[in-house]
Image (cartoon, grey):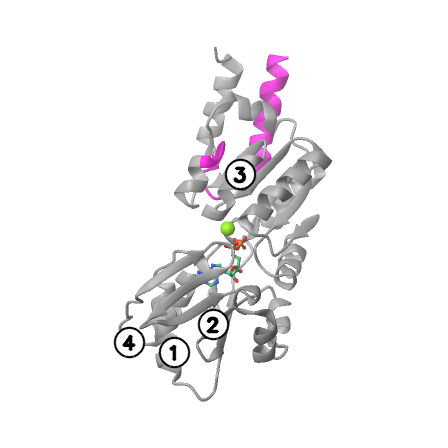
Amino acid sequence: SIMPATLSAISNGARRGILFKGGVHLESLSHVKAIAFDKTGTLTKGKPEVTDMIVQPNLNKSELLRTIASIENRSNHPLAIAIVNYWKSNYQDNLIHPDKIEDIPGKGIKAWFHNKEWLIGNKEFVGQQEAEQFENGVSLSLESCGKTVVYVKGSEGIVAAIGLQDIVRPETKKSLMVLQNEGIHTVMITGDSKNTAKNIAAQANINEYIAECMPETKVETIKKIKEHYGIVAMVGDGVNDAPALATAHVGIAMGEGSDVAMETADVVLMKNDLSRIAEAIRLSKKMNRIIK
Ligand code: ADP
Ligand code: MG
């Protein structure tokens, strides 16, 4: 049976845009010792914009960009949406249809046009050495400003590097500070590069960051944080965060997140506002005081 104090906490939460899927999560939340956060779409707005475009000089730029946008048009990753939007606002031409695509979560996307293979994704995905030869140090300066760099590889090798900038949510830094003042350890877990993660971590003033994580690595990281700190919550928005949300004691999804994240999570922040996490913890502690 559900206690009146629990019901009251759940309805108070609902009024503040915090959806608790049950009383058990409230109990766990009151004891939380560490919180892990996804980067893109969680600590940041998740609406990146293309800021830099480096294209192999001897190629037809608009044709190449059309191919890139046509491939990304088949993905709903925030970086893909940004690249398609960039194409739409700079070129009038229509997109074309790849023969086949393959989405590789945490890495990028693979596509085929007339048996020609294309790769769009991070350095590791397209080949680190080749990517570094192409960008020749530019990626470090972009990543040091918190930008994400995506590489494009065709049959003739790397042909483009694209810089994308996402912004840290206005409430991120303060929300993390409030949690840290409650003695909660905060960690960022991201699939992005170390340099980008370092910059965003500094802007958010988060205690720790772990970069270049595949969806499985996010799960392993949550397990390690559990061993080290005890009760752990994870906050995320993406399809790739769902396994980590399920692994944490309390999974918290952003209301603007993917359906999978919201279904997997125990708590949903309907207003996409990170300051509601501290509020959820406060409600859970109040409930516990009444019950005990
Ligand atoms: P995060 O953990 O920050 O949400 P992801 O795990 O979704 O990031 O992706 C990690 C990295 O993989 C991205 O930074 C990007 O380099 C690459 N990537 C993933 N999907 C795509 C895509 N559709 N297009 C280009 N790059 C991608
Ligand atoms: Mg995300």
Dot 4: few (<14), some (14–19), or many (≥20) neighbours within 10 Å?
few
Task: Tell me which amino acid carries mark 2.
Answer: Val
Is there a contact, CB below 8 Å, between mark 2 and mark 3?
A: no
Q: State how far apart marks 2 and 4 are (Cα).
A: 22 Å
Q: Earlier in the sequence, mark 3 or mark 1?
A: 1
Disc 1 secondary structure class: helix
Residue 230 is left or right of residue 106, and the answer is right
Whether residue 22 is visible to the viewer of this picture, yes or no, is: yes
Task: Tell me which amino acid carries mark 1.
Answer: Leu
Q: Residue 99 location in percent, x, y?
A: 30, 66
**Foreground residue among 191 and 154:** 154
Q: Which residue is mark 1?
A: 64
- Is residue 282 within the magenta segment? yes
Q: Earlier in the sequence, mark 2 or mark 3?
A: 2
**Which quadrant would residue 36 be assigned to in this image?**
top right
What mark, if any, has residue 92 been given in the picture?
A: 4
Q: State how far apart marks 1 and 2 are (Cα).
A: 10 Å
* 3 or 4: mark nearer the eye: 3
Q: Residue 156 location in percent, x, y?
A: 46, 80
Task: Tell me which amino acid carries mark 4.
Answer: Gln
Q: Is residue 8 above or below residue 244?
A: above
Mark 4 near ligand 1 (CB under 8 Å)?
A: no
Looking at the image, which residue is at 58% across and 25% down? 284
Q: Which residues are magenta?
A: 264-292
Q: Which residue is mark 2?
A: 152
Q: Earlier in the sequence, mark 1 or mark 4?
A: 1
* 2 or 4: mark nearer the eye: 2
Task: Tell me which amino acid carries mark 3.
Answer: Leu
Q: Which residue is mark 3?
A: 245
Q: Residue 50 location in percent, x, y?
A: 46, 69
Q: Earlier in the sequence, mark 3 or mark 4?
A: 4
Give the residue at the far top of this rendering: 1
